[in-house]
Image: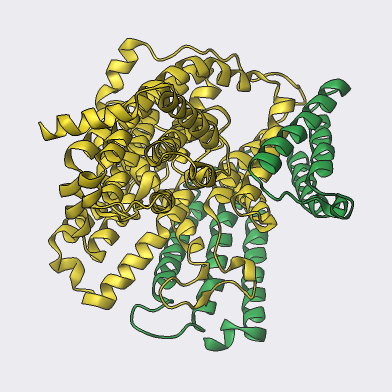
Amino acid sequence: MELFDSFSIGLSVLMGWKPVLIIIVGVVVGILAGAMPGLSPSTAVALPVPFSYTMEPALALILLTLIYIASNYGGSITAVLINTPGTPSAAVTALDGYPLTRQGKAGKGLGTALFASTIGGAVGVAILILFAVPLARIALKFSQADYFALALFGLATVASMSRENVLKSLLAILFGLLLTNIGIDPISGVSRFTFGSDQLYDGFTLIPALIGLFAVSVVFSKMESWTGDARSMEKVDNKLPSIHEFMKIRMTILRSSVIGTVIGIFPGAGATIAAFISYDMARKASKTPEEFGKGSLEGVAAAEGANSSSVGGALVPLLALGIPGSATDAVLLGAFMLHDLVPGPLLFTEHPDIVYGIFCALILANIIMLTIGVYGNKLFIKVVSVPEAVMYPLILAIAVIGSFAVSGSMFDVAACMGFGIIGWLFRRYGFPVAPIVLGIVLGKMVEENFRRAVMMDGYATFFTDKLAFIVLLISFLSFIWPLFKNWKHHKAKQLNIETEKSK
Amino acid sequence: MQYFSQGIGLAIWTLLLLAGFIGTGLAFRFSSKREWTGQALVPVVIMALALLFLAVTFDFPGEQAGPALIPRLWIFSIVSMCLVVHFFTVRGRTDKDPKAGRIGFVLLGIVCMVAYYFAIQILGYFLSSVIFLAIMMYMFSCRKPLLIVFVSTGWVAFSYLVFYKLLYIQLQLGFFENYL
């Protein structure tokens, strides 16, 4: 009954044309910002903060929260259409979304991303509404060893990206992990592998690395196979997934939504890790795992369901305990403070209009996002209908401005080009590039939590902490299993050849 | 090992690694395994980078769970993994190198991007972007002057309005900065 009363207070905030307009603006701005490589969700939320100062607190915070949730979906649009993830978490969407576009099924890729994002967003919000306070308390009890185990479990998802060559994938992930060690050591402050360059003190920024590895490398690969025939990309249809196809992926969406929300709750974990882990789970549970990486709707659904629902999860510790779990949450926390509001348990009782106003707006935002997406997809798809002679130069131009926009540094542009060349060479010789991204994303989390756990409790902590031990064991098996399967497959192949020879 | 972690020692170590890389390349190129040269060189480059980093870690303070711990863990894993991949390559159990496509065209593209990078700092983002897009579109066989002009100026106008004016991203203006 109390929840019902609180919701009626929240709904009353949304009455009138002004709140509705703000919800629409928030969703549209969020989608556009997410689709723009170089603009991370945190930047997209930070930019309107000064403008929101003069607005009513409830409406201002609704606007910012909606930009946050919609930008996570927006990142999938460019990931599916031009293999340029607008947000880091959309890198996982690109793994199957772009192959779908290459097959002329961009509509299905975008449609799946949209439905999965909407359902994921709704599940995340539902869990946020029902379990915000108890969930946040449980997450805060996690030790450094548990976080290390969680990050290592994320790394184990490399198995999902390997398909044929697990060794090459492992090498690629280790390469990504090594790159994260460049810069100032987060614990001791020692400068590592910077070779005297000031610009390397912060290491490589994620977005330029992503754009280089995914987008620039594809343009270079295209140039290598260029026939000199300037034509449009293959015929692309804008058909959304059929009901039959949707029913086939419904469980994947639901599972990913729950995984995304749960991972989102852990401070520091975030949408990217949620998307990678969920993608791995979806592949393991799939009846057609061989289609992953080649244009699987399940792959797109898993990535998008998880990254959108993680927003609801990330809001749990922010609203319930006042602890920001990600950079975007930190910006939101700042916006709360700008309006003299302190997130935490008291916010629920002292300002139910704001908390439940945000909850109601989030529900409404998912419906608006679905509507805009269904009609907007037809427009977005036109992007891939432009001739390749226009498309590829534009991708390079977007890559340059997108890399520069992250921190206004030409070094990021150079890094993007460098990663583009690395990505091209990796692709050329059959080394997958997605594991490099996974390594870069998780490297810092693995290192910081591992070292802190060892410093506080010694190496034995990984055996005495039950949760960490179990998750580490599962991660180890996830690494070993594909190697074993590869070996078995190779042995069976050899046996077949020998049998045929003897015949 | 600390000798190789900085200064002349590090330079010698780098040269040794470079020699190892060139040696491997030549060994594959002039053997029966020449079709696997690229497959062999990719792990060798990664291993060389890891070994270069390994030398640098000897300059880090030695403490329990210190700054060298995790990099060394990755480095040893990389070296082991590279040796395994290399073993499979030498045995011919990996895919052969793909047939060389238009490598010259790719290199030209890379040169254009590098030139674009420097041009941004000299001519400014807007002018260099127009030139870069026009050249790249021409390279991609676009022979419609109107389309080239429309796309390159259209992109620059879009980036001016959205990135420069709306988002306040301080795009480089090059020597025009003095006149604006």
Classify residue A449 by image quadrant.
Answer: bottom left
Residue most extreme to the bottom: B3
Q: Position of residue A197 (x, y in %)?
A: 65, 71
Left or right? Give the position of A465 relative to B144: left
Residue found at x 43% / y 20%: A111
Figure disc tally: 0
Instruction: Find residue A277 and report its horizontal and vertical position in percent.
Output: 32, 43
Q: Which chain is yellow?
A: A
Q: Position of residue A173 (x, y in %)?
A: 44, 54
Residue A218 visible in rendering = yes
Q: Residue at x 17, y 37 (%)?
A: A130
Which chain is displayed in green in the rendered image? Answer: B
Q: In this view, does A499 lie to the left or right of A69?
A: left
Residue A135 shown left or right of residue A291 in the figure: left
Residue B101 appears in the figure: no
- In this picture, residue A142 sits left or right of residue B120: left
> For this rendering, which residue is in front, A73 or A331?
A331
